[in-house]
Image: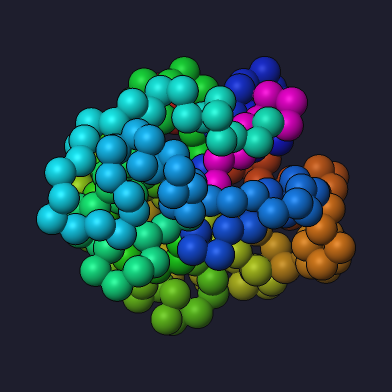
Amino acid sequence: MRLFERNGFKVIGVDCDPNPTLALAFGIEEEIVPLSKRHDIIEERTGAKPGTYGSIFRINPKVDDLIDKVGYKIGNITILVMGTIEEGGEGCVCPASVLLRRLLRHLILKRDEVVILDMEAGIEHFGRKTIEDVDLMLIVVEPTKKSLITAKRMKKLANDLGIKNLGVIVNKVRDENKELLKDVIQKELGLDVVGFIPYDEEVIKSEFVGRPADLNSKAAKEIEKVFNYILKLKNSTI
């Protein structure tokens, strides 16, 4: 996100993880209440209290102003902590899930900013159909067999949703394993590896003390390659 900002883009970073920590990567230590927990806003926009079932509520709530209302702005980057629906049974249609899905769709289809979704690990979000309209999905894997199996499932589900552009980022990589990992991933997944993020002690230290990672670190230099890949794809197909 900082690379996009540095190159003149406005960016919206959406934290969709049940354990939202995206803001910490920017040195924001204050607690940001996820939109999924903002019961006042959910009721205001849908006409029903969160957690209510069988009631009548708006399925097309107004969302175009929510990014300004609940987003945390840092320069030309806006962090939006969405959260998830946590109570049992809330995976179905309920006021909170309708609002979150409609807002995500608005951000992806209607906004001019670069929108980056930080999704929870695993495949659960595919079932909620919250990402079907994205231009590009990057699957982050670790150099383990279990991670590769999950990535295979993610690729299939992404294809089912009609997501056309897929790529793989390998995290926590040792230099001596790069070529082997690249060959295995291309053979098993049939996808390009767009970046190898090295195991970097500086990144770990930055995470621990709650400060942004150094843009000159080894990991940041690899992430810049991913950024360049996205720009190239944007200019050619998206």
How many callouts does the rendering have? 0
Quarter assignment of residue 12? top right
Relative height, residue 124 to residue 13 (above, below): below
The spot of residue 91 in percent (x, y) is: 25, 62
Relative height, residue 202 to residue 174 (above, below): above
Q: Which residues are magenta?
A: 74-82
Q: Which quarter shows the C terminus?
A: top left
The spot of residue 113 in percent (x, y) is: 51, 23
For image coordinates 72% across by 68% down, the residue present is 199
Quarter assignment of residue 46? top left
The spot of residue 185 in percent (x, y) is: 42, 65
Q: Which quarter shows the N terminus?
A: top right
For image coordinates 65% across by 68% down, the residue present is 173
The one of 138 and 228 positioned closer to us in this rendering: 138
For image coordinates 42% across by 81% down, the residue present is 146
The one of 177 and 82 positioned closer to us in this rendering: 82
Left or right, 183 with reference to 80: left
For image coordinates 73% across by 32% down, the residue present is 74
Q: Magenta stretch mostly in which secondary structure?
A: strand
Left or right, 166 with reference to 56: right
